[in-house]
Image (spheres, grey):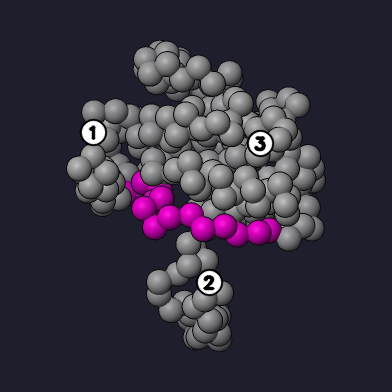
Amino acid sequence: MKEGKCTAIILAAGQGKRMGGQVRKQFMELQGKPLLYYSLHCFQESGLIDEILLVTGKDQIEYCIKNVVERYGFSKVVKIVAGGEQRYDSVYEGLKACGDSEYVFIHDGARPFVTEEILQRGYEAARKYGTGIAGVLSKDTVKIVDGKKNVIETPLRDRVWIVQTPQIFEYNLVRCAYDRLQLFDKTGITDDAMVVEEMGNHTVHMVPGDYTNIKITTPDDLDVAAQFMQKISG
């Protein structure tokens, strides 16, 4: 059962340097539609989501309005916000634009295979624990090394999770953590859960994501995504 206003922050401000080419990765086409379309479509169709804030580069706002939001009728997109230099800067801009939200779903626009089931699992955890972070158990053994690349620890595989998005939080919790982050060195910050862990001093709860919920970062990832799409479409 849904309670409280839920806002999705979809991040599409990355430059995609590892992808190469002139088109930013979030606008590259996958089966005839921009990559960003697929994550927006999931949140648009979800009964959990009341509104969507799209965060993109300042010079990409007009493109997003005309070629993504208006073209595909994403009526839940209420604001398009200019992002910052780093991912955490873009998230903060999105959080500041949220208004009276009770829960916030932070998602990478370059993850096209997010599903309603992932949203539901994360939301139920956020209601119970204040956080619900999508991820999958590592299929590989992981080694922790020191500065000389000598192995110092081999954690149990059933304790190692590969983190994904969406990452769902009580709004006040994540906003306060990000407010506090502005007072500190941001070096090493890699995801929103880390901000809540370190700046909010709050335990983060993991929920099952999906192994297909990949982030498109390189040309090889786009090839894998095309294969996934072929299986989905039958």
Residue, x 72% and y 52% (percent of image)? 128
Contact flag, marks 1 and 3 (Cβ < 8 Å) = no
Left or right of 167? Residue 140 is left
Of labels 3 and 2, earlier in sequence is 3
The quarter of the image holding the C terminus is top left
In front of the other: 32 or 145 = 32
Q: CA distance from mark 2 to mark 1?
A: 33 Å
- The secondary structure type at the circle numbered 3 is loop
Q: CA distance from mark 3 to mark 2?
A: 30 Å
Left or right of 227? Residue 84 is right
Image depth: mark 3 or mark 2 in front: 3
Query: Magenta stretch containing residue 194, yes or no?
Result: no
Residue, x 61% and y 26% (percent of image)? 50
The quarter of the image holding the N terminus is top right
> What is the magenta segment's predominant secondary structure?
loop
The residue singled out by tag 1 in the image is 31
Contact flag, marks 2 and 1 (Cβ < 8 Å) = no
Residue, x 32% and y 44% (percent of image)? 19
The residue singled out by tag 2 in the image is 160
Query: Which quadrant of the view contains residue 63?
Result: top left
Query: Which quadrant of the view contains residue 146?
Result: bottom right
The residue singled out by tag 3 in the image is 2
Of labels 1 and 3, earlier in sequence is 3
